[in-house]
Image: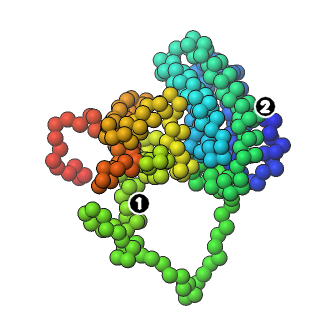
Amino acid sequence: MNFLVPVVEKLPKGHPVQIYYKESTLIQELLFGLSDCNASEDFEKYFNIFNELATIEKRFVRKENQLFPYLEKHGWTGPSKGMWSFHDTLRSQFRLLEEHNTNKHYDKITENLPYLIEGIQRLLTIEDTVLFPNALELLFKEDWEEFYEGDAEIGWMLKATPSPYPPIIEAAYIHPSKDIESRELSFSLDNTFHYDEGYMTPDQVNLLLRFLPVDITYVDENDKVIFYNRGKNRVFSRSKGIIGREVKFCHPPKSVDMVIRIVEEFRAGTKDQAEFWFQMKDKMIHIRYFAIRNEKSEYKGVVEMSQDITNIQKLTGQKRLLDWD
């Protein structure tokens, strides 16, 4: 374990792989704590350690949406398939233990916990000996420098937020009397575009898409992700690493065949819409796919819309008055 540490220590401060290794140290400490803890004798201690370990989900999502897309760009697609499946197996083990935790089935916790611990330890070994060494070999300095913003969107397991990489260099102060830079106003008519019904600036379009209460992902006619809206409360995590990625690599291996079929049917013109709904923890999630076609009915891609409809499902009767007061 940690064969790559001497190399990682020589990386520039804040390098994404350094952050992964800081998380690895934390994960190993948590695994040791779980191994040394008896849930039936001190459930609160076990439960706290387990919940902190469960934040490993952030690490999984960062790898899937940030690291894997860059590896794909350099021709290595293995992690997007094999390691993502490994993540999903661990997710299933977490869900099973969460159910036993809720019901305080101590015997079931004791029975299943070793499988989770062993699985994570195996994952860390594969990362240390295969994933990160190859990533450092394949990716360029400029690639790693693009990670921070997307990583920050998803989050880290660490309590302290890592410093930006590369470090942010603050611009020198310019007195207002000497500031001659020309700036475009967001409301300038010169900066607007005419849409089907009305005019908006690019900033306004961006704000509109950001504040829509649905997740939108647009895949073009070449099966490449070209856009997603950055909402405040997304249903599924996304980061800028997904832009330019083939749609078949943007979903877990267990659902990729279904996604490919939807895209193929849309392209062939045999279908125009597909929808799904399912329970995700305490939320009801509604997902819809729509074929995008131009005025000539030519296929131009597909838009995926995901929404948390938990509260919508609870609506009854009618509400016609504002209840703010």
Residue occupied by mark 1: 206
- Residue shown at 62%/78% (left/top)? 173
Give the number of the mark in front: 2 or 1.
1
Left or right: where 144 falls relative to 7:
left
The type of residue carrying mark 1 is Asn
Left or right: where 284 falls relative to 226:
left
The type of residue carrying mark 2 is Met
Query: The N terminus lies in which quarter of the figure?
Result: top right
Residue occupied by mark 2: 1
212 or 70, which is in the foreground? 70
Q: Are marks 2 and 1 in contact (CB under 8 Å)?
A: no
State which quadrant residue 91 falls in.
top right
Image: 268 above or below 205: above
Lower position in the chain sequence, tag 2 or tag 1: 2
Mark 2 burial class by Cα count in 10 Å: few <14, some 14-19, many 20+: few
Per the image, label 1 sits on a secondary structure element best described as: helix
Q: Position of residue 22 (x, y in %)?
A: 71, 42
Mark 1 burial class by Cα count in 10 Å: few <14, some 14-19, many 20+: few
